[in-house]
């Protein structure tokens, strides 16, 4: 069974930075993050594919950077210039063999 282990997150002031990491196993085709704020739906944030291509939500472009250490099956989400509206639970996901697996989620809180 594939498990994704997330780390990072926490409390930061507006304008600050945080880094999330997500480690999986197996032959991973893509890794990325969604986020869910209280009372809202889960929204796409960023993804990095095995070939290195990336996509970002418009709301985080230019502020967030997704990267990957293939040897360690780990993806990273560097979040800079954080805003209070970035506050949410961030869920890592990985696509392996056509299936999507999810991490347990990590809280990111940005204070104004």
Image (cartoon, rainbow, N blue to C red):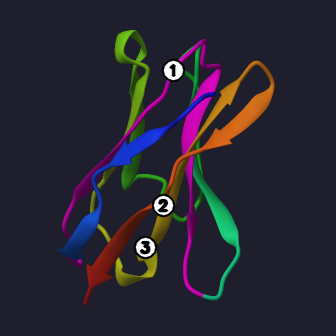
Which residue is tagged 3? 86
Residue 55 seen in the figure: yes
The reply to whether the C-beta atoms of the residues labelled 2 and 3 are less than 8 Å apart is no
Asked if one can make out residue 77 in the rendered structure from this viewpoint, the answer is no
Horizontal placement of 70 versus 96: left or right?
Answer: left
Give residue 79's mark. none
The residue depicted at 23 percent of the width and 78 percent of the height is 14
SS at mark 2? strand
Q: In terms of sequence position, does the residue under pointer 1 or pointer 3 come before the other?
A: 1
Quadrant of res 34? bottom right
Q: Looking at the image, which residue is at 55% across and 64% down? A: 35
Q: In the image, which is nearer the foreground, mark 1 or mark 3?
A: 1
Instruction: Indicate the quadrant containing the C terminus: top left, top right, bottom left or bottom right.
Output: bottom left
Secondary structure state at the residue bearing disc 1 = loop
Q: In this view, does 11 lie to the left or right of 105?
A: left
Residue 101: % across, % down:
66, 39
Q: Nearer the viewer, residue 61 or 70?
A: 70
Cα–Cα gap, marks 2 and 3: 10 Å
The answer to whether residue 17 is left or right of residue 20 is left
- Label 3 sits on a secondary structure element that is helix
The residue to which callout 2 is attached is 90
Instruction: Locate residue 48, reporting x and y percent.
Output: 55, 30
Which of the marked residues, 2 or 1, is nearer the chain's N terminus? 1
Q: Residue at x 41, y 77 (%)?
A: 87
């Amino acid at each position: 069974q594939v498990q994704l282990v997330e780390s990072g997150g926490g409390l930061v002031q507006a304008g600050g930075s945080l880094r999330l990491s997500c480690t999986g196993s197996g032959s991973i085709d893509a890794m990325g993050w969604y986020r869910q704020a209280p009372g809202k739906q889960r929204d796409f944030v960023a993804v990095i594919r095995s070939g290195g291509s990336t996509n970002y939500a418009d709301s985080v472009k230019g502020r967030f950077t997704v990267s990957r250490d293939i040897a360690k099956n780990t993806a990273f989400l560097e979040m800079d210039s954080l805003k209070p509206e970035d506050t949410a639970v961030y869920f890592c996901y990985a696509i392996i063999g056509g299936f999507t697996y999810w991490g347990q989620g990590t809280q990111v809180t940005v204070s104004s």
